[in-house]
């Protein structure tokens, strides 16, 4: 059996009961690791015993994946103690990588000032004075129509 130290695990065992009622059974799942025994209550119903084991990292400090542990199921029926299952287990630790800063190097970049110049030529505009001669507009003689003459005459009366 194998346990990942950072994950909880739910185990379900089929259990056959003879000579006692299921409701009269008291069961626990026991783990022995580094000489210390840990117990977790089990629920028994309809021919099955289930247990939820929290992640080992929650209750064991300094987990060593190279050490084998022992696991077993204890069942008490009235005044009778039974041990219907037992096994060895290993712990599996996920790969972890840790990094710490040992030295911080600060690089200073010295910026040299840059001066950019640009020469633009201004074109001087010479204003030429133009001499404008005044000329009289030619007089155009307008011929009046007969109707215009009659209208002018009536207006002047």
Image (cartoon, rainbow, N blue to C red):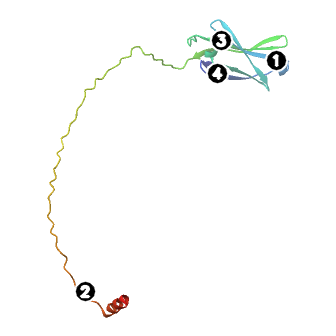
User: Residue 146: which quarter of the image?
Assistant: bottom left
Q: Mark 3 points at which residue?
A: 70
Measured Cα–Cα span from mark 1 to mark 4 = 25 Å
Q: Name the residue under label 4.
A: 8
At x 16%, y 70%, the residue is 134
- Front residue of 132 and 15: 132
The mark found on residue 25 in the picture is: 1
Measured Cα–Cα span from mark 4 to mark 2 = 117 Å
Left or right of 128 in this view: 80: right
Between tags 1 and 2, which lies in front? 2
Given the current orientation, which residue lies at the most extreme top position? 35
Q: Name the residue under label 2.
A: 142
Q: In which quarter of the image is the C terminus?
A: bottom left
Between tags 4 and 3, which lies in front? 4
SS type, badge 2? loop
Measured Cα–Cα span from mark 2 to mark 3 = 134 Å
Left or right of 96 in this view: 51: right
Please report whichever mark, 4 or 3, sits nearer to the chain's N-terminal start: 4
User: Residue 142: which quarter of the image?
Assistant: bottom left
SS type, badge 3? strand
The local crowd at label 4, few if under 14, some if 14 to 19, many if 20 or more residues have their Cα within 10 Å, is some
Q: Quadrant of the N terminus?
A: top right
Measured Cα–Cα span from mark 1 to mark 3 = 23 Å
């Amino acid at each position: 059996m194998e346990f990942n130290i950072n994950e909880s695990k739910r185990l379900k065992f089929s259990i056959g009961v003879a000579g006692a009622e299921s409701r009269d059974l008291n069961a626990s799942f026991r783990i022995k690791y580094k000489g210390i025994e840990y117990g977790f209550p089990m629920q028994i119903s309809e021919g099955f015993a289930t247990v939820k084991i929290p992640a080992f990292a929650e209750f064991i400090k300094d987990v060593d994946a190279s050490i084998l542990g022992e696991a077993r199921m204890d069942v008490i029926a009235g005044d009778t103690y039974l041990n219907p299952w037992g096994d060895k287990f290993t712990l599996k630790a996920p790969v972890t990588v840790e990094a710490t800063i040992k030295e911080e190097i600060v690089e200073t970049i010295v910026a040299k000032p840059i001066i950019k110049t640009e020469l633009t030529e201004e074109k001087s505009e010479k204003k030429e004075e133009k001499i404008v001669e005044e000329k009289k507009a030619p007089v155009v003689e307008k011929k009046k129509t007969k109707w215009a003459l009659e209208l002018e005459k009536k207006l002047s009366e």
